[in-house]
Image: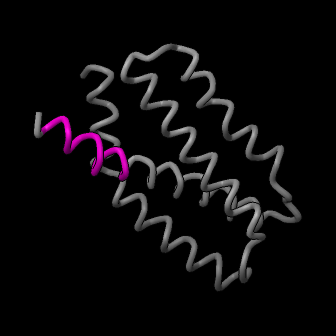
Amino acid sequence: MNNQEIGKSLASKAPWALLFNIALFALLGVVDGAPLLSNLLFSLLFGAISSTFLLLYWHEKGGSFFIFALLMPLMLIIVSELSNFVALAWVINGYFFGFALALIIYRVGFLRDAVEH
């Protein structure tokens, strides 16, 4: 399996990940209520950026993108306001939601163009 096939494979599984994350958001909402909006926005953004960097790496745009993708979870923890363990759960779930959302955008937008050409 080449590097680009890895991105396609992950993109095909992203809708299931998104559904799982939505279910987990619902569970966390029942347990803890609403999260800090800034934490949720940061986690969605950093997850999407991490996914984008990994896709760039898999499409052979440079090895530095792999390092940047690995730094995104660390940066997310640094900028998030984590008052308890449930706040961390919101951030982690939001990160993976953003990651899966970016993969779905990649699947719908870029893979469709590749099939048409």
Q: Quadrant of residue 24?
A: bottom right
Assign the C terminus to one quadrant of the image: top left
Number of numbered callouts drawn: 0
Residue 71's place in the image compared with 27, above or below, is: above
Identity of the residue furthest to the left in this view: 116
Question: Main structural element of the magenta stretch: helix, strand or loop?
Answer: helix
Residue 63's place in the image compared with 90, above or below, is: above
The percent position of residue 22, horizontal first and vertical second, equals 49, 71
Find the magenta span and give its range.
Answer: 104-115
Residue displayed at 13% across by 38% down: 115
Residue 27's place in the image compared with 67, above or below, is: below
Q: Quadrant of residue 41?
A: bottom right
The answer to whether residue 62 is magenta is: no
The percent position of residue 15, horizontal first and vertical second, equals 34, 59
Closest to the observer: 86 or 63?
Answer: 63
Task: Classify residue 12 as left or right of residue 40.
Answer: left
Task: Classify residue 103 as left or right of residue 64.
Answer: left
Residue displayed at 32% across by 31% down: 6
Identity of the residue furthest to the right in this view: 83
The percent position of residue 18, horizontal first and vertical second, equals 42, 62
Residue displayed at 61% across by 22% down: 67
Residue displayed at 29% across by 47% down: 109
Residue 55's place in the image compared with 76, above or below, is: above
Task: Classify residue 84 as left or right of residue 21.
Answer: right
Assign the N terminus to one quadrant of the image: top left
The percent position of residue 105, horizontal first and vertical second, equals 37, 51
